[in-house]
Image (cartoon, grey):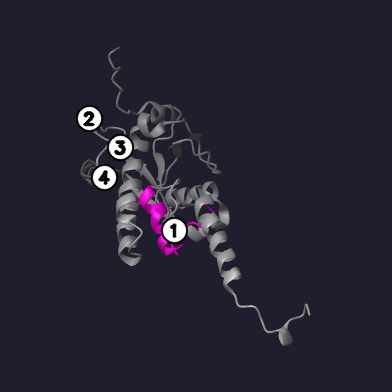
Amino acid sequence: MPARVPVPPPDFSFERQHWQRGYLQVAGVDEAGRGAWAGPVTVAAVILPATLTGAPFRDSKTLGAAQRERLAAEVRRVAVAWAVESAEPEEIDRLNILGATHAAALRAIARLDPAAQALVTDYLRLATPLPLLAPARADALSLSVAAASLLAKTERDRWMVALDAAHPGYGLAAHKGYGAPAHRAALDRLGVSAVHRRSYAPVARLLQHELFASAEAEPTPPASLRHDV
């Protein structure tokens, strides 16, 4: 069996491309929750100091919950600026997930103080006048995007725990709104809640099934009130 090639840690390679053009305040941007069936999509923007060395920030998907929380606290401690914004299910259903993610990203970027002069995103091609690099897998390659992924993931996880308390029975604290078997079973048992994304196919199918079941259950009006007799 061939030896596994070590994956290099994220660095400032993309940020440096902006720095060399005179854009010193470079924000990394990443999201969490795009594929979930319930809850918000959360986007973070982070500007790290160019002098930062040895930062252990990594793509949040590669870390355990305790590691993510510890590193997210470190991001907030060392960042020049950071902001987190969310798009709720209503906005996701209205704009679609990509549009809602972009809207939340632009809100997060607008809250940065000092303001971002350029961006690195995880393949989010935002409508912005700021210079933008949007490489695939940027959360594994860019230190700023990795830092943003940590804030987006930990903030969304905390919110899903709160939603679990408000909407018990769905297991939101465990699966964070993604399509786990337990989530599918809870939807079949309890129906669609206020925090589910109605435009997502599994939820939309269940709503359609509930609509048909409700229509079939309606009693037939007496002949004297019917219009077809």
C-alpha span from label 2 to label 4: 15 Å
Q: Residues within 10 Å of mark 4 (few under 14, many from 20)?
A: many
Question: In the picture, residue 51 is in which quadrant?
Answer: top left
Residue 69's label in the rendered image is: none
List the residue tagged with mark 4: 72
For the residues carrying marks 3 and 4, which lies nearer the camera in this image?
4
Residue 47 seen in the current view = no
Q: Secondary structure at mark 1?
A: helix
Can residue 199 be found in the magenta stretch?
yes
Residue 52 at x, y = what percent?
26, 33
Q: Which kind of residue does numbered mark 3 sit on?
A: Pro
For the residues carrying marks 1 and 3, which lies nearer the camera in this image?
1
Q: Which residues are magenta?
A: 181-200
Label 4 vs 1, first from the N-terminus: 4
C-alpha span from label 3 to label 4: 16 Å
Label 2 vs 4, first from the N-terminus: 2
Residue 19 at x, y = what percent?
40, 30
Instruction: Say whether marks 3 and 2 touch (CB < 8 Å).
Output: no
Q: From this view, report whether residue 39 is shown above or below residue 63.
A: below
Label 1 vs 2, first from the N-terminus: 2
For the residues carrying marks 2 and 4, which lies nearer the camera in this image?
4
Looking at the image, the residue that sits furthest to the top is 2
Residue 147 at x, y = what percent?
32, 39
Instruction: Residue at 25% x, 43% y: name it.
Output: 68
Instruction: Residue at 36% x, 31% y: name it.
Output: 140
Label 3 vs 4, first from the N-terminus: 3
For the residues carrying marks 1 and 2, which lies nearer the camera in this image?
1
Q: Which kind of residue does numbered mark 2 sit on?
A: Gly
Residue 54's label in the rendered image is: 2
Residue 188's label in the rendered image is: 1
